[in-house]
Each structure stands twice: as C-alpha cells, then as structure tokens.
Amino acid sequence: MSGVRSWRRLIPPLLSAVVLMAGSAAAAQAAYPASVDVNRTGFNPPCDGDANFIVPKMQTAAEAAYNRLGHLASDFTGAAFTRAATLSRTVNDWGYYVHSHGDFYYNADGRRYTGFREDSGDCSQAVIFSKDIKAKRAGRQSNLVFVSTCHAADSNTTLPDAFAIEKTKSSGSTNQGPEFYVGYIGVQWDSDEWTFEQRYWNALAGGKSVGAAFDVAMLGSFGHAGFDADWWGTYQWSGVAGPWTVCKYCS
Amino acid sequence: MSTITRLRRIVPVVTIVAGLAAVSIGAATGQGADPFVAGGPSTRAVPLAATQVDRARALGRQLAAALGLPGVSQRVERLDDRFEHRTYDEVTAFDASNRAVAIARFETDGSVAMAVVLGWRPGRGAPVDRASAEQRGRSFVRAAGLVADGQPEVRPTGSGGWMVSWSRVAAGVPIRGDGIRVSLWADGTFHGLTRTERTLAALPDRQISAGAARLAAANWANARFPATASGMHVASVERAWVAPNGMFSANGLDAPAETLRLAWVVRFETTGPLVERLRSVEVWLDAGDTTVLGGDVIE
C-alpha cells in the first residue's frame, strides 16, 4: 500500500517532467524546420501518363529521417511545392530534401546553374535555380541538405553554395560545422536512388555519422553499374539539427 | 557489361573459425510477417549470444588484418535488415579516441558481406590507372576470402577513385545488383567492398522471345503513356534477373522483393518535351509470361 502511495506521489512530477521534456523537444524542433519537397506530378498522370510508386516512399522516408534528426520536418508536393513556396520557406529551413528532375540549367542571366523543377501540381514546372535559393538564404547556415535529383553532385554543381555549404570534405579532426550536402552524380535511376536513400537514412537512424552513413549507403545493391553520388561537409557530424553546442563526433 | 560467370566464397576469411563458420543462426528475414515500411529504419538489432559476439570479433580482426582496416576496439551488433532481406553481424571498429573508423559486415555463415574504411582519405600516393585498379581490386577480393571470376567492370568514380565490379551471373544472365564491388581511393588503397548474393526464383519453363518482349513492352507503354508514348522509343531489350519492385503498382513492396526473377528488361528513351520530366523508362517483364514485375525511371 505504501508503495502504491509512493508511486502516486510521483505521478504529478513525472507528468510534469514528461510535459516539460515534450515541450522542450517541440521547441527545439520548431527552431530547426526542414522542408521535404517532392515532385510527384511530373512523374505521374497526367504529365507522363503513369504512376510512380517509388517517389512517395522517398518522400515518407525523408520526412521521417529529418524528424528523427531533431528537425520539424514538413513535406510538400503538388501545388504546395512551387518555386515561390520553396523560396519562401528556405529562409527558415535548416534541413532540406528535394526529389525532382534536376540539371545544369541555363538561366535568363546567360549563365548556367544547377537547379531542379518545381511540382506546382501541373505539367508546366518552373526551374528553381541555385542562384534563387542562394539569394534568399543569403549565406544562412544549413544542416543536412539532400538533393535527390540528377546532376546535383556533379563536380560543377552550384547547389551546395546556395545553402552556404563549402564544397570541401572535412574528415578526421577537421570540420566545417554541422553541415552536409548529398547529391547524385550524372543521371540516376529511381530504384537505385531509393536503395541509396533508405540505406542512408537507416544508417543515420542507427547512430552513424553523416559521412559514415554515406559510405555505407554507397555499398548498396544497385541495379545499374553507373550509380554514383558525392558529398561535401563534415564527415563525422552526427546529423542532429541545429548549430553545434557539443559535437559528439568531433575532437 | 562484365562477363563474370560465377562468384563463390572460399573459406570464410578466418580459417581459425572454420568450425564456428558452420554455425548457422538461420534468423529468418523477409517481408512476410513484418515487412519493411517506408519511413522507418530498415534494420533492427537482434540478440546475439556471447560466443557469437566473440566469433564476429574474431572475423572482424581477421578481415582488418587482411584488408588493412584501422581500429583498436570493436563493437558487434547482429542486425536484421528488412529492406535487404538479410541478417548480418556488423563489426564497427574504433580508434583510440573512440571514433568509428571502419565497419565490417559478415553473413551469419561468417563470409564477408561488406567492409568500409570510414572517413575521407583520398590517398597520399600517386593515382593509379585502370589496369592497376583492377589488379588491386582482385587482390582485395582475395584478401577478403572471396573469389570473383571473369573480367570486372572498372570505372572511375565521381569523387576521384575507382570502382571495380564483378556482376553475378546465373543461366548466362546478369543478376542486377548482385556480385562483388570494390571501391578504391585514387591511389589504389582500399576504401570499401560489398558482396551481394540473393535468392533466385526457378527459371520459367518456357521463355518468351526478345521480339515478343519488345511487343509486350510497346503495348504496355501505349496503354500507360497514351499521350506521350510517341516520345518514347525502345533503346534496348535484354534479359536480367531483377528484384520485383513497386515502381508501377501499389503492390505493397516498399523494398525490392526478396527473390529475384528472370525478366526481359525493355528500356525506353524519351525525346521532345517529355525529356524534361522523364529521361528513360524501364519495364521489367517476366521472361515466362510478360507479367510486369516492376521497372525503373530516370527523371
């Protein structure tokens, strides 16, 4: 009986603690939003006449992964994934994932930039250029940026810079802050991208660093021999949202 | 396409544990009762007896010596991977600062499934050429206790190193995603190795011809892409073993299927405005009855 009373006495403070912890977690997440933009319309009826059932899996997996890393992740597709909406949100995003059609596009200024197409819910899909994102973010720090499009990690890609991620590889005792950029080299098939991405998110969920997760993901079972991807950032970073206060994986 | 005819394991890396290698844990994997669902992790730790932990550590040390993997201490976990339908022992090696520096994975029979040196180490030596990369790839495969016959595909990677790949072949047909791959830094030092060998379904009693597969694929494309099929043309028709997937149907396959099937892979390439959304399409037709097993796209 006395044991029961003791437990009952503990309930209010335990509940308070739970509420406080949940509150602080929510506050922390709110501080580090991440957007997951996925072009589904471009690869589904009526635009290409067929349904692609792998892309929604990528969307679900990415959103869940960013939430596990401590972001408040939101996913956008169809009319919610437009150039205007993406550029409006990017100002506040710490994390970003996009799956779409990507390339090294000519811009109206006569130069070429890496970019990707919006969804917009119709078949006329504007390009979101890296220079557009760069102008909006104005050098603001990013955490994990995963660009799931073709050509996103070609050697001439301009997207890391848009997210203020230096195109250098920091490993061992060196770091360049809590930032990491992942993208594909050349053109890649969806099923290989899905395999890579699931292996990547799973490795992160298992506590591997963003770089170790990349190396593990690269050793997947890919259907096409030419699969390739690349990264820039801090290899040993844990991937947890926000600026560093204590870096578990850094000396 | 490489012309590898077979892959086989020789004695598991560690002869010292030859007896232990016979210990088959036989943990069931697969999607039957508890399938992988997109959004969740695909691996989960499963209990491992102390003797099995010791065996995995021994395998890890032996492989580290054979491949030159770094590390002064190890952590062992048995993982059930529902995305890849396999169970393996993962041995993570740490340096003196407790930083993870290498990972090795072993099948439950003790053979090598994967090894990777962690970190960015492009190498300090002079870059090696294609022939040297192939030779070094072969030597690392041997060192890992594996055998890969035939000519590998050797290609430079975008990050500056080399990938040396032996595709597994059955009944004269390549098995997509199966085989051995070795990744090397630019100077030819070891970066990573992976071996995949999945279950194959029985060959169909009768196989349709390439022409019949091409016709079936064209009909499929006309039905599924009525407005845009004119912008698609057949680029290749070839046989391959494939893992059925959920590309073209809501069939509940969030992961590639566990058992691979013989298929005709018909690839379409696109022209005109369609290229801006869809660059290539593959449809995988069952080699026996043209049932659509899945497919792929380049967006």
Image (cartoon, coloured by chain):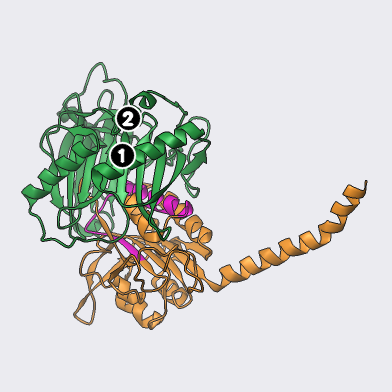
Chain B representation colour? green
Where is residue B155 drawn, in percent x and y? 14, 50
Q: Residue furthest top?
A: B205
Residue B16 image label:
2
Badge 1 amino acid: Gln
Lateral position of residue A109 relative to residue A205, left or right:
left
The residue segment tinted magenta is A181-207
| Quadrant of residue A239 within the rendered picture | bottom left
Whether residue B222 is in magenta: the answer is no
Visible residue check, residue B245: no
Residue at the (30%, 20%) spot, across then down: B202
Chain A representation colour? orange
| Quadrant of residue B129 within the rendered picture | bottom left
Contact between marks 1 and 2 (CB within 8 A): the answer is yes
Residue at the (27%, 49%) spot, across then down: A189
Task: Measure how far apart labels 1 and 2 are at the Cα level.
Answer: 9 Å
Where is residue B132 drawn, in percent x and y? 8, 49
Q: Which residue is mark 1?
A: B62
